[in-house]
Amino acid sequence: MAKQKRKVPEVTEKKNKKLKKASAEGPLLGPEAAPSGEGAGSKGEAVLRPGLDAEPELSPEEQRVLERKLKKERKKEERQRLREAGLVAQHPPARRSGAELALDYLCRWAQKHKNWRFQKTRQTWLLLHMYDSDKVPDEHFSTLLAYLEGLQGRARELTVQKAEALMRELDEEGSDPPLPGRAQRIRQVLQLLS
């Protein structure tokens, strides 16, 4: 017959209150801190505290749970005090935009940094916005063209298809393209990848 796992007894409300009170008075003695021979049980068993009406001490797991609860309560009280004092908790630093991250990625690639590694999201952003001179400035576009030379697989195919479709749209519009810089970028990408 297979052995069944022992059910861990749940800590009652009364026991929780006693434990909170005891932890507020001083640090709890763990099984390793208890003197050997005096109520020190085997691993997982409750240990009796010397001098406190022989109340069982928490197991290491129960002690960790209690410490987490107390830490959470302290943080909550601290936030409450800050709110009452009119101080706003410090906000985390603002995140960098996708444009900044993608251009940094491109610059690191160009400088052949050892810490550069391929990032699909950055490449995708660059491929989506490479025709927009506001998002990818002219000084970065030449670097982007060099990056596109190494483009492989489906990304390369889709980039060529998209450039061809955009070129067809520009041809259909007529002789006065609204964005001559964009048309030039499309031609450069097509010449490079075709």
Image (cartoon, rainbow, N blue to C red):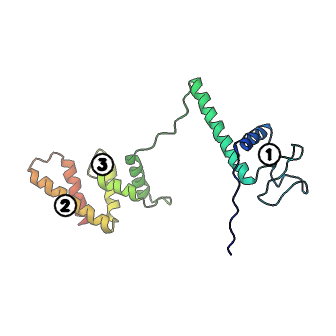
The residue type indicated by label 1 comes to Leu
Q: Is residue 62 left or right of residue 92?
A: right
Give the secondary structure at mark 3. helix
For residue 143, say whether it is visible: no
Q: Quadrant of residue 44?
A: bottom right
Question: Callout 3, which amino acid?
Answer: Asp
Q: Which circle, 3 or 2, is nearer the viewer?
A: 2
Could you tell which of marks 3 and 2 lies nearer the N-terminus? 3
Q: Residues within 10 Å of mark 2 (few under 14, many from 20)?
A: some
Give the alpha-carbon distance from disc 3 to disc 2, as whole Å: 21 Å
Mark 1 vs mark 2: give the one in front: 1
Q: Quick one: quadrant of the C terminus? A: bottom left
Against 2, residue 87 (above or below) is above
Locate the N terminus and report the quarter of the image it occupies.
bottom right
The label number, if any, that marks residue 138 in the structure image: 3
The residue located at (74%, 53%) in the rendering is: 60
Instruction: Using the image as rendered, state which of residue 91 and residue 102 is in the foreground.
Output: 91
Q: Amino acid at mark 2?
A: Glu
Q: Nearer the viewer, residue 91 or 130?
A: 91
Measure the alpha-carbon separation of dots 1 and 2.
72 Å
Residue 104, x across and y down, in percent: 42, 51
Residue bearing the label numbered 2: 164
Determine whether label 1 and label 2 are within 8 Å by CB. Answer: no
Residue at 66%, 43% (x, y): give it: 69
Marking on residue 104: none
List the residue tagged with mark 1: 28
- Residue 132 percent across, percent down from the top left: 27, 48
Q: In this view of the protein, which residue sits in the foreground, 20 or 136? A: 20
Q: Is residue 4 above or below residue 177?
A: below
